[in-house]
Image: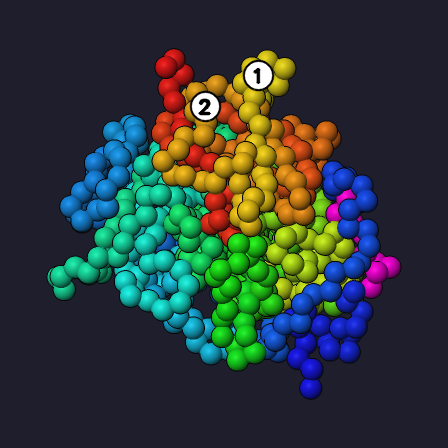
Amino acid sequence: MDVPPANDGLDPSRRKLLKGGAYATTLAAAYGWLSPGTGTAQTATPAPSPAPYLEPFLDPLPVSPVKSPTLLYPRPGRLPVPGEAGREPHQRYEEFLPQREYELVARAARHRYHLHLPEETVWGYDGLVPGPTFVTRIGQPVMVRVRNALPQEHVGFGSPEIITHLHSGHVGSAADGFTGSYYSPIKAGPNLRYPGAFYDHHYPQYPSNGDLRKVTNTLWYHDHREDYTGPNVYRGLAGFYLTFDALDSGSEHTGLRLPSGVGRYDIPLLLQDRKFDSGGNLVYEQFDPEGFLGNHFLVNGKVQPYFRVEGRKYRFRLLNGSMARWFEMVLADEGNRFHNFTFIGSDGNLLERPLTLQKILLSMAERADIIIDFSKYPPGTKLYLLNRLEQNDPRKPSGDRLNPGIRMLRFEVGPRTADNSVIPSFLRPLAPMPDPRDVGIRRKWDFERNNGQWSINGKFFDAERVDAAPGLQVPEIWRLETSGGWAHPVHVHLDDFRILSIDGKAPPPEWRGRKDTIPMLPGTRAEILVQFHDFTGKYVMHCHHHAHEDHAMMIRFDVVPKNT
Ligand code: C2O
Ligand code: CU
């Protein structure tokens, strides 16, 4: 019997419908900014892959536990404390003294990706895949101690030396998880609760420039080890970090009154693909700088789970945590008809006004904050989060759509329940940006393939080389260009940016707010407005395709005080 390449969650008799060219539309048609003529023909054939058949919707959706605060010992400080890996002093530490302390332990654990798959050894924060969810507040500075208890001697892919980055975090350089600042597990005496060296990350919980219009709510943390981010994240080192403030209050009775209750009606969804061999073992193709695609689809660490929902509104925080896979997510019913959802924020930033959408594109590291109202559906209804984007190789999505697509998550709607949440007509005002005509500093960044690896402006990443030194608070326009046949989601640390144009056009409404990652298809030119506030020191910009990032598509920029 033939093994189907990947399980789309459909009845096998319907699988033939999958590549219906008549239904194919291009990304260009949808987003209007892809150069015309790309991806109109359906040519590429997926390489045959011995994926095991896995029956979908057998596992319940895992919902990560909320991380509990603790009291750290030894007490953390501005300078490294005994047992801590070397680092620079934390910036503005006394101003933002930690009010909440957490300890995360990166360690090996056993995990099953699907009911019918064998247990695998994963690396997880607190041994969980995904890691626990942080629930934090603006104005309450946080210290996260990340203890490295990974196996020093390990077999297979990945590096047990780690450094954790808070993606979209507005934090000092010493807390950012600079890719070169990784540290090893060190065996300590039996008197310590967990062995291993640690690194203290100081998160001030302070919006950029003190401007509450720049609060970012959906962040995620993941390993950022130089050259090994791909395998380490693939092994499981990633989790959500949520921030609440007076508007996005975390309550259905105050502020915007969005659907609330992390893990209950406010659910983070980590979307990833993974590759399994025919024996059901996880595969990582370590030596290919192109990266690779998975042959199964995971939500929160399980292949195609189901989630029983009440008949009320839910908030879902979608995150593409894949290495090379792009998604276009839609909400569909059993008959593959698409349903509207409400899109409230991108990359963690609430838009000014919610958008009613039927699809959302997510390149790697991008987030979509959406609301689905299940009270519209009779109990017993089944709905699916479906990925419609066809992608046949790790370079880029083909530009065509799958019909209907891969059912990644099934919602099983239950009876209606009380719901005090609302979908407000206005969310968060957008801080005005400086007039681009007044911006004097411009830089250009070319993302290119180079000798089988990946370069920016012809150079490979060097943690010791400073590629740009933007001044604190000084706005700059960065022109990004991609060439060849590869897509690159470009991510900037420290401060979110604004997209001024993509191929000469205004960005689609979903991307008109603040962003930290911009999906760049092959041959794209974009202009972004960057402006760094509050903290100085070393940061990075890079492609978030982990194989590209690990094969050197990254620059270091040092934010410097304005008048030097
Ligand atoms: Cu999500 Cu520099 O990374
Ligand atoms: Cu890339």
Q: Where is the N terminus found, in terms of image quarters?
A: bottom right
Residue shown at 51%/33% (left/top)?
496
Residue under label 1, please give it.
439
- The crowding category of the residue bearing disc 2, from other C-alpha atoms within 10 Å (few below 14, some 14 to 19, many at least 20), is many
Residue under label 2, please give it.
470
> Cβ(mark 1) to ligand 1 < 8 Å?
no
Give the amino acid type for the residue marked by disc 1 in the picture: Val
Question: Is disc 1 in contact with disc 2, using a CB cutoff of under 8 Å?
Answer: no
| Mark sitting earlier along the chain (1/2) | 1
Compared to residue 153, the image places residue 201 above or below, namely: above
Residue 208 % position (x, y): 45, 28
Residue 444 % position (x, y): 58, 28
Q: Residues in magenta?
A: 20-28
Left or right side of 412 for 20: right
Residue 67 % position (x, y): 36, 54
Compared to residue 320, the image places residue 254 above or below, namely: above
Compared to residue 549, the image places residue 173 above or below, namely: above
Disc marking residue 499:
none
Is residue 24 shown in magenta? yes
The secondary element bearing badge 2 is classed as loop
Q: Nearer the viewer, residue 360 or 163?
A: 163
Left or right side of 192 for 7: right
Q: Where is the C terminus found, in terms of image quarters?
A: top left
Place residue 562 in its image quadrant.
top left
Residue 521 visible in this rendered orientation of the protein: no
The secondary element bearing badge 1 is classed as loop
- The crowding category of the residue bearing disc 1, from other C-alpha atoms within 10 Å (few below 14, some 14 to 19, many at least 20), is few
Residue shown at 46%/27% (left/top)?
468
Compared to residue 475, the image places residue 387 above or below, namely: below
